[in-house]
Amino acid sequence: MQLKPLARSLAVALSIVVIAGCSSTGGTQDGDSYGSQDGSSMGAGTSGAGTGGQYGSTTGSGSSAGQQADSRIPEVRTIYFDYDRDTIKSEYESAVMAHARYLRANPNAQVVLHGHTDERGTREYNMALGERRARAVQRFLNIQGVSNSQMSVVSYGEERPAASGQTESAYSQNRRVVFNY
């Protein structure tokens, strides 16, 4: 008789734990990880905001060319991701930094971050992965001082491929986030 209330309590507690676990955002605000809610940012995929001085190359120059560059939308508007990953590759950090500089210098500018995936996986999973990729870029920009009010996120999942076909080349072109000003 007393076992039923205990079982109900355990079921409710388990449900709450599952829901709380699903709402986790992953990553940290100090730059330890720019994405990966599932712990897949281990090892080389993790990029820290304070590593290696990659971002300091234009800040110390004091030239007007740097300020002029900040007034134009950066040319690279698409960054690509590894299969089933939502961490920003180190080769694209400089491109995302250029967008951060532009957005900080132009506080009225708005950007929509479009998250995309390749066709592998379920539609629902790909919609979530596209959103995680776009949110990883949003977190990176936010850490660099860009206001959340300047950014919005849209996930298209596998619905708007950049390349058709079932080759690794086509898949790699579809795993992306596009900056849309």
Image (cartoon, grey):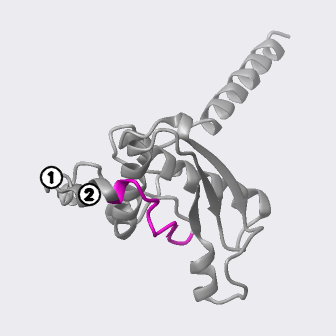
Please, what is the dominant secondary structure of the magenta stretch? Answer: loop
Say whether residue 16 is left or right of residue 94.
right
Say whether residue 145 is left or right of residue 115.
left
Q: Identify the secondary structure beneath mark 1.
A: loop
Quadrant housing residue 146: top left
Q: Amino acid at mark 1?
A: Gly
Q: Residue at x 58, y 63 (%)?
A: 178
Q: Residue at x 44, y 47 (%)?
A: 103
In the current view of this chain or complex, which residue is farthest to the right?
A: 1
Provide the residue span drawn in magenta: 69-83
The residue nearer to you, when weighing 3 against 123, is 123
Quadrant housing residue 31: top left
**Percent position (x, y) of residue 18?**
67, 34
Q: Which residue is mark 2?
A: 66
Contact, CB < 8 Å: mark 2 with mark 1?
yes
Q: Which residue is mark 1?
A: 62
In the displayed structure, 115 sits above or below 4; it is below
- Judge the density around disc 1: few (<14), some (14-19), many (≥20) Cα neighbours within 10 Å: few
Q: Residue at x 68, y 83 (%)?
A: 163
- Judge the density around disc 2: few (<14), some (14-19), many (≥20) Cα neighbours within 10 Å: some
- Camera sees residue 162: yes
**Percent position (x, y) of residue 21?**
60, 35
